[in-house]
Amino acid sequence: MAINRLFGISSKSLGVYQKALAVTSNNIANSSNPDYSRQRVIFGSSPAEYQTRIAFGSGVTIDDVRRVKNQITDNQIWKYNQSNSSSSKHSQILSSVESLFQEPSEYGLSNILNSFFNSWNKLSVNPTSVPVRMNVLQSAQKLSNKINTLYNGMLQVKSDTKAEAGDVVKTLNSTLSELQEVNKQIYSIGVNVKAPNTLLDTRDKLINELSKYANINVTYEKDNTVNVSVGGLFAVDRLNRTEFKVNENSAGQLNIQTSDGATNMSLTGGSLNAITTVYNQDIPDYLKQLDTVTNTIYNQVNSLHSKGYTITNPQQTGINFFSSYSDGKLVINKDIVNNVNNIAVSSDGSEGNNDIALQIASLKDTKLINGLTVLQSYSNLVSQVGNDKKTSDEKTQTTQLVLNQLQNQKAATSGVSIDEEMINVLKYQRAYDASAKLIKVADEILQTLLQMV
């Protein structure tokens, strides 16, 4: 019976260390997989056999194959993913807005505004000159075109962010669907398996992706399935899942809401937070400031110009320089476009009088908007866009540093060390060889006994 026990222990040991080598081989194969968690074999003793009040060991067994994981680190990574993704996306969108202004350059609105007011100053020197009047018209047309380009450019960025929100929500819904399926697989396999490690890695990978789209909250069940909320709303568990959609309400506010439209997400992180912030707050604020600058130019120039007299025959007065302004469209009076002699320069109709031209030129240095000149107000707008982007850049850099440290911590804990795994290979191989030698010893003992019979 002792020889049979020796054979049993040895053969069991061969199987155990063969499986241990398989786990180590799997670790080595996944050494470059960032979503893989290193697995560790937990050995245990087989139940002892009792004979004549003596316990005889029955060999080795594998109690478990555990993922080496630090859940606190993962939770921190998901938390900083939300912040980093939000600031990074915010910076990316504002970069597109900032490029529209082309400041400082000859194509920027600051230079064009200067040229517009300077053209009136030149006209004051030679009020009857047709070429100088044409210069005023051309500078006004450049001003109109630039304002329209800026306005439409920001509207296009706004439209693009809405389209991007749709793409992100589509990906979000797809990820939630995958997570629900993984939840189901974990539950069904978990009945027979202590910890389905590969599925748990997939589960954590999907949660990591979700944390980049919006602020999330994760709770764990005893069966290793998870319940996830997104933007403060229930999103998925093993049995149920919520579909989300993009909606723009009557006030022009972009919301991410449940597919039935009943509830809106409360976003505080992730790329969706940045997108909705730009759409609902940043660009409307920038457009409002641009409108304020343009409306001031429109009203002030018209107020002065309408008091002046043209050099047409007969002379006319009460003519506005701009006919309208709305939604980025600053329209120059058609009568002036068709005939520059309709530009009013004289305040009393006398030849050589240049009062109106001087007054319009002086608007450049007049504080018209909350104690600021038109140029200063526009410069504040440009500065605000730049500062908003800089703030997002700095936050991105800060959160990225933290994320890098957390990723290093995760790699130190869950990452595969080739050196360590090769040591395990040698260790398990030696144990396997020793088990094979035990079988050989048992066989020799058995042969000796048979020869004695």
Image (cartoon, grey):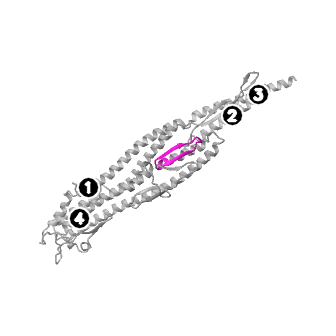
Name the secondary structure under disc 2.
Answer: helix
Give the number of the disc on residue 16: 2
- Measured Cα–Cα span from mark 4 to mark 1: 16 Å
Provide residue 418's location: percent of width, then percent of height.
Answer: 57, 36
Q: Which residues are magenta?
A: 209-230
- Measured Cα–Cα span from mark 2 to mark 4: 88 Å
Name the secondary structure under disc 3.
Answer: helix
Give the amino acid type for the residue marked by disc 1 in the picture. Answer: Ser
Q: Circle 3 sits on which residue? A: 5
Give the amino acid type for the residue marked by disc 2 in the picture. Answer: Val
> Relative to residue 343, is residue 431 depicted above or below?
above
- Measured Cα–Cα span from mark 3 to mark 2: 16 Å
Q: Is 346 on the left-hand or right-hand side of 51?
A: left
Q: Circle 4 sits on which residue? A: 299
Q: Nearer the viewer, mark 3 or mark 2?
A: 3
- Measured Cα–Cα span from mark 2 to mark 1: 77 Å
Q: Residue furthest front?
A: 262
Name the residue rendered at 20%, 66% in the picture: 303
Q: Circle 1 sits on which residue? A: 377
Give the amino acid type for the residue marked by disc 4 in the picture. Answer: Asn
